[in-house]
């Protein structure tokens, strides 16, 4: 008998989670000093790094400039060592271009781009280790990096995958579950308003199942947003302790946009 | 919410890939015992009064079996006596990995609420998970995991109130594991020890499988067989072509002879002959074995001797019979000969048969003789030998050590006394691998809850066709009605014809236990007085069955047809219908013929009948074959259930009317699903037979100066129509019977895996099965595909996977074949019963085939076929000359040709209890010394019976 049993009769998944449980999430903000914003996230064994530059003047051709808002430029890549098989990944292959485009669409929906007309925001994400849910990890990392860069957003964008096994929706799929057959979808959500920034699905799924699946993915996204929120608050606290020591005061906005404290540059 | 847990990375290196997986450990996995107050479980499975009377543990105890125990002693675990067992996840996963059938049976037990089996997810429990240590094998690690879990249980439950008496008993047959468990203070027994301690239920001991430990004690140290090669050496040998891999097929007539069927490249398959006990080397029928070819000078020819293993005897005698095999033969007769050097895969299943009691009165070891002659005798240990005498029993093989003449096995269950109708039916079902046990709780749990009614919600999704005048036409006594028809005039002068099929796929959802069971059964099996359902009765005879005057779900195929029977449009829809009448073929025929009847149903039937005739004519013009095979029907006594009369089935016009529309629906659906899913449509094809298949038909026709053209189905159909001999009306039917035998088997296949779709017999470019979802699983899949195609239902990954579909097709083809064999065996058994009650009968018949030493005779009256042998052991054999060309067989001075008319006497040969058979002897033509005098019919036979 081949194949893994994705969901046991007792209701446990391959790695021991219940269907609606997420993988362990760990995140850090401000990992690089030179960039305007950066973040690192681990969702189970999937590890992603995001770096944000901007907003700055549009580089290159002027024709890309938009007069009413900022241009968002995304670039997605995977490290050669990110999977079990070492593979050379040329830049701009079809898969990563597609992923870059998806990220761009997601963040255009979330970032308040109209605040920065005629400028550009660059978001670079790299998958360091891949174990399913690459898109979600990228979105979540990028959200943290954008916040780190102090760029205002409507809300956190949280992304999560969900799949279907024997009529039960599973949240946050790992690689084994993603490749075990069955349809999976990736969803990016602005949790407070419940708006969907992006919804992506590659295989066929019947309409009847779509609602339950989206429901599962949305619940998972909301769970993730709580985690991201606590990461941001934790980071804020650390930073404000540092700034207080230096005698510089700044007030954390009640919203989620965090101005980068100039003190960090000094460290 | 995210529960972050201590997590351990589990690294599995298999092949070249390194797989890293997360492994979460939890603290919310409960123990499942009624005693426990710590765990927050809702409905504990393990009972408080879990007591099996045992000498070893007098108090309440829970059992924990290890993996090997589950794999080898499942017969014990399945016994209703064994309850309150903890199945560890480690064990269950390993079982799943090692044997799919055992895993399925295990799951059935777990689902059975009566058994109180609890699955403990120990691999994800914080306190019972262990990591593999340096230099520890995977097996050792799992054994340790089992011990750790057992230890955890005993400590965990010690804390529970009132549980002082409770014991956790680990069952293992592994000596090392047992010692280690003893050291860590666990209560541990060997399976045998424990079962023998169950004083109240001694019969359980017989069901124990013999383990390798015991075998050392049983048999003498004399080594009878050469050692098998280890798997690694076999693989190397096959790679370097010094060894051949093939399927072992024992000979039915000679226990010292077998062939190994070696699959070669493409069509190049070879057969290797194996002779002699040493060379057969413990291989059993259907095993996958490795053989080594002998040098050419040791090659032999297949012997024509019939040899049956008569039970234990001296070594010298064995040699003697082996010598009998060797006889002088010409060089051309020699076949590649080899010897078995290793077993790649055993294909043992439980075998039916009878006990051959040991002559020693107090002996507990006996030999078992399987019903299938290709299976060797099996040595079993039982204390109930006296009770089992004359009974049909089931025995499983446990192993075949090299110093034992026979394989060792254990008693599984008693099927009943031999010759008994129920018992024999059970045996034939088991021997043909027809799954027929009652549906498990898990399967039944997916049935709709009664009372069931159609809801508003259902109506919204379906077309309401309750107003249509729909009726069904079936054989008498049919309770699983899966097709209904209607026909009505349209305003534009055309006709609307609908075929409405039971919507089984509405009730059987993909992937659940009910679906898996139906997929595994594949088909309903119809025996002479019993039906083995593919789906539970609630569905087959009630909710799915399109009975009259109840509302039922249907899948409808509706055509607009003009009066020339040309299809103008086709549509498919899920619907609700209300059948107005359930008719038999005869009733429907009567209505059509009776000019006084003019109600809606009759008018609808007449319309259908008219169209069907045109459709049939067109189909036959297109080259479809009408073949014939005599089908018999038993009239069964309603009280004794014995067959009281036997007659061939009669076909009415209405039979072909229903058939015509079913064909039309099947073809329409096949086209639709293929258009929609070109890669994964489940279709049915009937390959054209290779020309050589027709040799016998051509020869037979030539003997009557008739030429049969076989270049195409059309040519064959035409020449069959023209083939007539004056004064011999049955000739045409005989030819058609022969033509049927030339045909290939029709098979299911997945459209993405094949390029040839043609259905030869129906002369249709594409075909599938849509019209009988209650009794065929293929139709359920076709329903699902069609439902997805019209947007009425959801799809699921397996439906779109051509490889999985292909595997499914293989199973369906296998089940259909086995069902046919079982049906034939059932007819044969009932024929025997019939002749047993009738005594000798003298009947006219025709010669169907001529063989080297026999003729095969067909009795049209009963559709019965039998062999008249001209050679026998106790008489001087007549002079026989066989001419291949005719073919003719000359006995003394009389030449027998195919289709000759003969008269035979039929009787039942009951000399062997296990293999009773119908015997035929020649009466006419009279050949002195060969034919027999006609015994008088009836009365004398009865008298003879009394005398006996
Ligand atoms: Zn407990």
Image (cartoon, coloured by chain):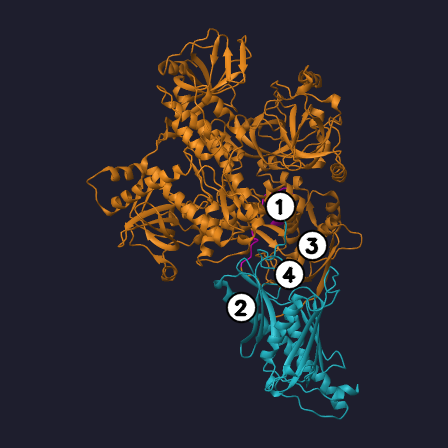
Spatial separation of the CA atoms under disc 3 and disc 4: 22 Å
Q: Residues within 10 Å of mark 4 (few under 14, many from 20)?
A: many
Residue A32, percent across and down?
Answer: 76, 79
Closest to the observer, B238 or B2: B238
Q: Main secondary structure of the magenta part?
A: loop
Q: Quadrant of the C terminus of chain B?
A: top left
Spatial separation of the CA atoms under disc 1 and disc 2: 55 Å
Mark 2 and mark 4 in contact? Answer it, CB < 8 Å: no
Residue B98 visible, this orientation: yes
> The chain coloured cyan carries which letter?
A
Q: Is residue B387 above or below residue B102?
A: above
Tell me the subunit letter for badge 4.
A
Which disc number belongs to residue A214?
2
Residue B421, percent across and down?
Answer: 45, 30
Q: Are marks 2 and 4 on the same chain?
A: yes
Which disc number belongs to residue A16?
4
**In the rendered structure, does residue B269 fall within the stretch colored magenta?**
no
Callout in the foreground (1, 2) = 2
Element on which disc 1 rests:
loop
In the image, the segment drawn in magenta is B43-63
Q: Colour of chain B?
A: orange
Q: Is residue A40 above or below residue A170?
A: below
Residue at (64, 82) in percent of width and height:
A63
Q: Which residue is mark 3?
A: B151
Q: Is residue B518 left or right of residue B224?
A: left
Closest to the observer, B374 or B738: B738
Q: Is residue B865 left or right of residue B110?
A: left
Tell me the subunit letter for badge 2.
A
Callout in the foreground (1, 4) = 4
Element on which disc 3 rests:
helix
Answer with the quarter of the image where residue A71 lies. bottom right
């Amino acid at each position: 008998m081949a194949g893994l049993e994705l969901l046991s009769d007792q209701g446990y998944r391959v790695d021991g989670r219940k269907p609606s449980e997420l993988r362990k999430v760990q995140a850090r903000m401000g990992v690089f000093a030179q960039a305007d914003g950066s973040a690192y996230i681990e969702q189970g064994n999937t590890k992603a790094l995001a770096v944000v530059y901007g907003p700055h003047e549009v580089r290159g051709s002027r024709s890309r400039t938009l007069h009413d808002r900022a241009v968002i430029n995304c670039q997605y890549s995977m490290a050669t060592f990110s999977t079990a098989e070492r593979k050379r990944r040329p830049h701009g292959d079809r898969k990563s271009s597609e992923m870059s485009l998806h990220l761009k669409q997601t963040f255009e929906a979330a970032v308040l781009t109209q605040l920065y007309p005629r400028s550009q925001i660059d978001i670079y994400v790299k998958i360091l280790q891949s174990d399913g849910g690459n898109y979600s990890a990228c979105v979540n990392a990028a959200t943290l990096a954008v916040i780190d860069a102090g760029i205002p957003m409507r809300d956190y964008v949280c992304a999560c995958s969900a799949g279907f096994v024997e009529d039960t929706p599973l949240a946050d799929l790992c690689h084994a579950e993603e490749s075990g057959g069955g349809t999976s979808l990736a969803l990016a959500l602005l949790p407070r308003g419940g708006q969907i920034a992006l919804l992506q699905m590659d295989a066929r799924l019947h309409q009847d199942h779509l609602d339950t699946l989206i429901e599962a993915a949305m619940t998972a996204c909301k769970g993730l947003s709580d985690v991201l929120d606590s990461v941001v608050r934790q980071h804020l606290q650390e930073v404000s302790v540092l700034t207080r020591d230096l005698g510089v005061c700044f007030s954390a906005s009640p919203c989620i946009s965090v101005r980068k404290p100039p003190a960090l540059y000094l460290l | 919410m995210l529960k972050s847990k201590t997590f351990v990375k589990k690294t599995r290196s298999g092949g070249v890939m390194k797989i890293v997986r997360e492994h979460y450990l939890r603290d919310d996995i409960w123990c499942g015992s009624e005693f426990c107050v710590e765990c927050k479980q809702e409905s504990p499975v393990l009972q408080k009064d879990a007591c099996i009377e045992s000498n070893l543990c007098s108090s309440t105890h829970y059992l924990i079996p290890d993996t090997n125990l589950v794999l080898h002693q499942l017969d014990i675990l399945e016994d209703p006596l064994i309850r309150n067992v903890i199945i560890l996840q480690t064990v269950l996963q390993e079982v799943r990995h090692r044997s799919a059938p055992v895993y399925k049976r295990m799951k059935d037990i777990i689902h059975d609420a009566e058994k109180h089996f609890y699955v403990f997810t120990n691999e994800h429990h914080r306190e019972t998970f262990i990591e593999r240590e340096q230099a520890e094998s995977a097996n050792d690690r799992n054994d340790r995991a089992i011990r750790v879990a057992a230890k955890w249980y005993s400590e965990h439950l010690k804390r529970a109130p009132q549980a002082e008496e409770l014991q956790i008993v680990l069952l293992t047959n592994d000596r090392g594991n047992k010692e280690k468990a003893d050291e860590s203070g666990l209560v541990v027994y060997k399976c045998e020890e424990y079962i023998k301690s169950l004083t109240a239920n001694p019969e359980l001991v017989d069901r124990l499988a013999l383990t390798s430990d015991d075998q050392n004690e049983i048999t003498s140290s004399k080594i009878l067989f050469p050692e098998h090669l280890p798997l690694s050496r076999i693989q190397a040998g096959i790679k370097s072509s010094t060894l051949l891999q093939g399927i072992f097929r024992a000979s039915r007539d000679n226990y010292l002879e077998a062939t190994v069927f070696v699959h070669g490249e493409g069509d190049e398959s070879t057969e290797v002959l194996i002779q002699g006990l040493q060379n057969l080397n413990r291989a059993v029928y259907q095993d996958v074995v490795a053989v080594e070819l002998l040098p050419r000078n040791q090659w032999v020819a297949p012997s024509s001797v019939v040899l049956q293993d008569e039970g234990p005897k001296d070594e010298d005698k064995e040699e003697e019979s082996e010598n009998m095999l060797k006889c002088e033969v010409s060089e051309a007769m020699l076949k590649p000969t080899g010897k078995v050097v290793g077993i790649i895969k055993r294909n043992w299943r439980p075998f039916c048969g009878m006990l051959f009691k040991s002559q020693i009165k107090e002996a507990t070891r006996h030999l078992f003789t399987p019903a299938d002659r290709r299976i060797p005798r099996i040595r079993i240990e039982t204390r109930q030998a006296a009770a089992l005498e004359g009974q049909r029993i089931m025995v499983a093989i446990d192993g075949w050590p090299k110093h034992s003449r026979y394989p060792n096995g254990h008693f599984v269950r008693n099927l009943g006394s031999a010759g008994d109708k129920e018992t024999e039916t059970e045996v034939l079902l088991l021997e043909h691998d027809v799954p027929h046990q009652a549906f498990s709780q898990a399967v039944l749990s997916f049935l709709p809850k009664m009372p069931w009614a159609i809801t508003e919600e259902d109506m919204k999704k379906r077309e309401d066709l309750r107003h249509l005048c729909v009726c069904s036409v079936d054989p008498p006594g049919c309770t699983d009605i899966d097709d209904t028809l209607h026909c009505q005039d349209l305003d534009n002068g055309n006709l609307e014809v609908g075929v409405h099929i039971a919507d089984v796929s509405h009730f059987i959802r993909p992937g659940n236990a009910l679906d898996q069971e139906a997929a595994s059964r594949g088909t309903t099996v119809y025996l002479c007085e019993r039906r083995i359902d593919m789906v539970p009765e609630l569905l087959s005879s009630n909710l799915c069955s399109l009975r009259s005057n109840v509302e039922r779900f249907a899948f409808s195929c509706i055509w607009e047809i003009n009066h020339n029977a040309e299809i103008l449009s086709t549509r498919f829809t899920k619907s609700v219908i209300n059948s107005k009448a359930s008719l038999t073929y005869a009733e429907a025929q009567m209505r059509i013929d009776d000019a006084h009847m003019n109600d809606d149903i009759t008018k609808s039937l007449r319309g259908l009948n008219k169209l069907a005739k045109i459709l049939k004519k067109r189909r036959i013009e297109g080259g479809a074959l009408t073949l014939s095979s005599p089908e018999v029907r038993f009239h069964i006594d309603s009280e004794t259930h014995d067959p009281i009369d036997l007659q061939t089935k009669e076909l009415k016009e209405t039979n072909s009317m229903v058939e015509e529309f079913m064909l039309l629906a099947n073809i329409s659906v096949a086209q639709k699903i293929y258009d929609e899913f070109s890669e994964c449509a489940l279709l049915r094809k009937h390959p054209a037979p290779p020309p050589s298949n027709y040799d016998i038909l051509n020869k037979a026709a030539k003997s009557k100066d008739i030429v049969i053209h076989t270049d195409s189905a059309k040519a064959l159909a035409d020449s069959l129509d023209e083939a007539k001999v004056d004064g011999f009306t049955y000739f045409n039917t005989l030819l058609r019977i022969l033509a049927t035998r030339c045909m290939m088997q029709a098979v299911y296949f997945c459209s993405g895996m094949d390029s040839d779709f043609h259905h030869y017999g129906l002369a249709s470019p594409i075909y599938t099965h849509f019209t009988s979802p209650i009794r065929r699983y293929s139709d359920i899949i076709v329903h699902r595909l069609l439902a997805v195609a019209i947007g009425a239902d959801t799809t699921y990954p397996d439906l779109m996977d051509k490889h999985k579909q292909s595997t499914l097709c293989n199973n369906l083809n296998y089940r259909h074949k086995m069902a046919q064999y079982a049906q034939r065996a059932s007819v044969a058994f009932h024929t025997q019963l019939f002749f047993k009650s009738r005594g000798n009968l003298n009947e006219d018949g025709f010669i169907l085939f001529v063989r080297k030493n026999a003729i095969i005779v067909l009795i049209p009256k009963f559709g019965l076929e039998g062999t008249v042998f001209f050679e026998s052991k106790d008489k001087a054999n007549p002079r026989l000359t066989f001419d291949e060309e005719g073919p003719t067989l000359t006995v003394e001075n009389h030449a027998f040709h195919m289709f000759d008319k003969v008269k035979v006497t039929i009787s039942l040969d009951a000399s062997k209890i296990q293999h009773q058979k119908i015997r035929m002897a020649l009466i006419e033509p009279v050949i002195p010394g060969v034919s027999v005098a006609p015994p008088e019919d009836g009365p004398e036979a009865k008298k003879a019976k009394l005398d006996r």
